[in-house]
Amino acid sequence: MKALRDTWLVYSRAMKLNIKQPVWLVVMLVQPLYFLVFFAPLLNSLDGQRGFESGAMETFVPGLIIMMALFGSTFVGFGLIAELRQGVIERMRVTPVSRVALLIGRTFATVTTTLVQALILVLLASPVGGLAIYWPGVFLMFGIIILTSFMLGALSYGVAIVLKSEDTLAPVLNTVVQPVMLLSGIMLPMALAPSWLQSVADFNPFYYAVEAARALFAGDLESNFIWQAAVFIGGLGVLLVIWASRKFARAVA
Amino acid sequence: MLIETKGLKKTFKSRGKEVEAVRGVDLAVKEGEIFGLLGPNGAGKTTTMRMLSTLIEPTEGRAVVCGHDLAGDQAGVRRDIGYVGQEGGTWGEVTARDELIMQGRLYGMSKRTASDRAETVLEAFQLTEFADRNIKTYSGGQKRRLDIALGIMHEPKLLFLDEPTTGLDPQSRAHMWDEVRALRERGTAIFLTTHYLDEADALCDRLAIIDHGEIVTEGTPLALKKEVAGDVVAIGVNGRSEAAQNLLGAEDFVREVEAGGADPATGIAVMRLYVDDGSTALPALLRALDGADIAAASIELHRPSLDDVFLKQTGRSLREEETAA
């Protein structure tokens, strides 16, 4: 009960901060919009070819949404480092607030903002990319966005509290995120990959997230990718939350 | 007793090496007093405070804080203490009122109670006027007042202040001292760390001097200064310093002589003589030197300060470390 109340308190404080700075909404949407306008047209000629059987935009846009969730959630740790430096986290750690709530409340705020961004991107992609939206599929895809964002938010906060410095956080996160993004088939489908690359991608949970998002967008609710993405990302998310909460409880900041 | 510690120790591991930050601290803090922990940077002040406020776990030793065992009942300790860190604990695009209400709610207050209490606290710290402005627009002094307001939002029995006036201008500093005294009048005990001698002297009811992770002495500022000796006379001689020391040390009103090395540039060696009454000692000392045909190159009398206490206990001057740092 107390943990729930505390989580709500931490969440509402983080949300209030987000709402006061609507810049994040714009900043995080700019990158996918660039891709949508300056990159997506290059794929139009591949429509119907290998890897793009269900259409060029129908293949690219779902991946783009996962990419936005990926980048939007991975770098939330920077905000935490600023708060660490200003003693905000320390002040809260001296109160009786639940340690887990300090992490989960913030992570839920990350999930919320990512969902809002994803919704806006879906709505924009439809006119810009000329894309028909299959709402039941999109709705389920938001479930995958929630899991992705939850997992990466927890990871980012956990790494931030260990490293405590923007200078080291940026390269560490980049080193992780770049290969994860490339190996997920966001830019071009993994169906085009040589077999060794495909084998590596099989170990990347985001490969399943991207493929699941594509299946859901195309209205294929039967695809195995959907439950695989949910299990892999959800499971990894739970592990990372446990790990990061421990770091939060013990942080010597 | 609000705080009682026994052999509190903290060892950090850094690059495979063990660093003993605090090596067995025994302290007692009474209800309603301002207790200061004075020492140079790196002496273990902050580490001691962080252990007592549940931020880090002691490696060894025991402590009871506000009646709760530090190791066994962290939640109990947290309920009864307030803590204001060196960096404060506020930032950016939030208002003082929102942060205060949130702080109250983290301590379990209802929205209504927290809001009423925030109003009272804002008033007490003259922040009402800025209550709904973003904290990033605050001056250093205003921000510091808000930090303390956050620390006492839940009316703790004991408030920890880590270097409360570091970085403040002299006027804000004087205000801060008044705030701290006002808190004591209202019954809150204060445990503060400082490396300012004048702050420890003027503000603290009792203090402990800490150096290299150990308490070297403890008492009221007055008692500590008296303990050193009445006054200190520093006499510089050019050459024959050993003879001068023996000569002056033999005077029966000189309690103790502390030799100093010769300055390589001037050749002058300054010795420190601890005497009961400096004003009568000066002429007698000069006469004695004259009689032995030793010329005093310099002479200085000073009434004891906490720096002398520190020097006596550790062999180093806190003031010099301050300027060197």
Image: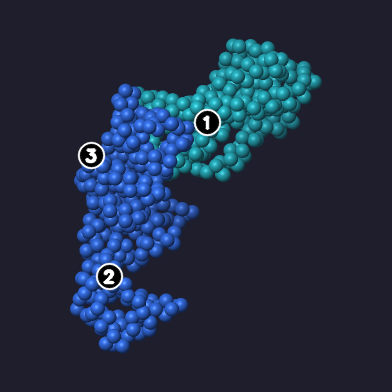
Chain colours: A cyan, B blue
**Residue sitting at x 24%, y 71%:** B278
Which is nearer the eye, B289 or B322? Answer: B289
Identify the image quadrant of residue B175. top left
The reply to whether dot 1 and dot 2 touch (C-beta < 8 Å) is no
Q: In the picture shown, does residue A59 fall above or below B318?
A: above
x, y percent for residue B120: 30, 31
Q: Which chain does the numbered disc 2 sit on? A: B
x, y percent for residue A253: 44, 43
Q: Earlier in the sequence, mark 3 or mark 2?
A: 3
Q: Which mark is residue B186?
A: 3
**Residue sitting at x 67%, y 15%:** A126
Q: Which chain does the numbered disc 3 sit on? A: B
Q: Which chain does the numbered disc 1 sit on? A: A
Q: In the picture shown, does residue B183 fall above or below A35?
A: below
Q: Amino acid at mark 1?
A: Gly
Quarter the C terminus of chain B occupies = bottom left
Residue annotated with mark 1: A153
Residue annotated with mark 2: B232
Q: Amino acid at mark 3?
A: Arg
Identify the image quadrant of residue A208. top right
